[in-house]
Image: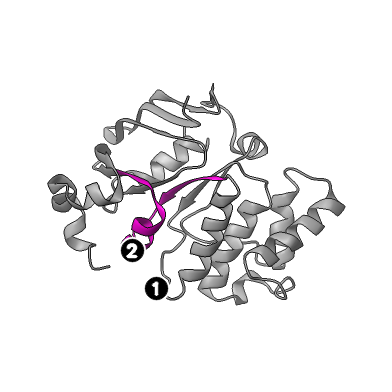
Amino acid sequence: MAFLEVADVTKRFGGLVALNAISFSVGQGEIVGIIGPNGAGKTTLFGVISGFIAPSQGDVSYDGESIIGISPDRLVRRGLMRSFQIVQSFADMTALDVVTTAALTRRPMREAIDYAAQALIRVGLGGKELKVPLTLSLQDKKLLELAKCIATDPRCILLDEVMAGLTMSETAAPIAVIQELNRQGVTIVMVEHVMPVIMRLATRMVVINFGEKIAEATPEEILKDQRVIDAYFGDHLDA
């Protein structure tokens, strides 16, 4: 049985079909990449899976149970966590405060503070607990997003362009965090435009174009798929 399964998910916004009968499954402990051009529907898909957007039709199951209609906060408490493409934090809170807020979804206050401090250390932000997120570098802001995910005790994380805006050398730290999480059994589903990163991390890739799945295969097979090359890779193979 799939750990996470998307079955014929369609989302319409008025006359616009953002997702059209998207289906794929993710096994427990996998790293699966979701790629496609801008506007393909990737973030909308994450919104449906994580409970922020109700699908027009179709189903999403997690750990053997449909999760359609379950609120995002309840999904987090069940181990399904997502990051966001645009990094946002509370302006008047420290990094430790921000991560503690995430940890409070699963723990009482005293325990949440301690766990948040450990999450910051795990992503390489030890010593920056009292920094205000707005003063952090983009790389550190991305690592803070990962610390927030870690603080919720996730079983499955949806990562929405966590490498966006980083140089290739700056991606090394978040890549290491993701790999360590996966070694610990956390399932990862990634929307990502930085192709060298997604090709390195994912064992399987799903390609979406204009709201439709056009391919699903290993990274090596995806590179050879002419439909994918025509729709996407022509502009991204050298990214």
Q: Does the magenta stretch include residue 194?
A: yes
Q: In this view, does 233 lie to the left or right of 181?
A: left
- Label 2: few (<14), some or many (≥20) within 10 Å? some
Image location (x, y in percent) of residue 168: 39, 73
Tell me how far mark 2 sits from mark 1, CA to CA: 9 Å
- State the SS at label 1: loop
Q: Is residue 47 above or below residue 96?
A: above
Q: Looking at the image, which residue is at 26% across and 37% down?
A: 213
Q: What residue type is labelled 1?
A: Met
Quadrant location of the C terminus in the rendered image: bottom left
Residue assigned mark 1 = 168
Residues in magenta, as a range: 186-206
Q: Looking at the image, which residue is at 59% across and 33% down?
A: 71
Q: Looking at the image, which residue is at 65% across and 62% down?
A: 90
> CB under 8 Å between callouts 2 and 1?
yes
Residue 100 image-quadrant placement: bottom right
Q: In this view, does 120 lie to the left or right of 3?
A: right
Residue assigned mark 2 = 196
Q: Earlier in the sequence, mark 2 or mark 1?
A: 1
Q: In this view, does 7 lie to the left or right of 27?
A: left
Image location (x, y in percent) of residue 91: 65, 66
- Residue 239 makes an appearance in the image: yes
Which residue is farthest right?
A: 110
Q: Looking at the image, which residue is at 34% across and 57% down?
A: 199
- Label 1: few (<14), some or many (≥20) within 10 Å? few
Q: Which amino acid does label 2 sit on?
A: Pro
Q: Does the magenta stretch include residue 51?
A: no
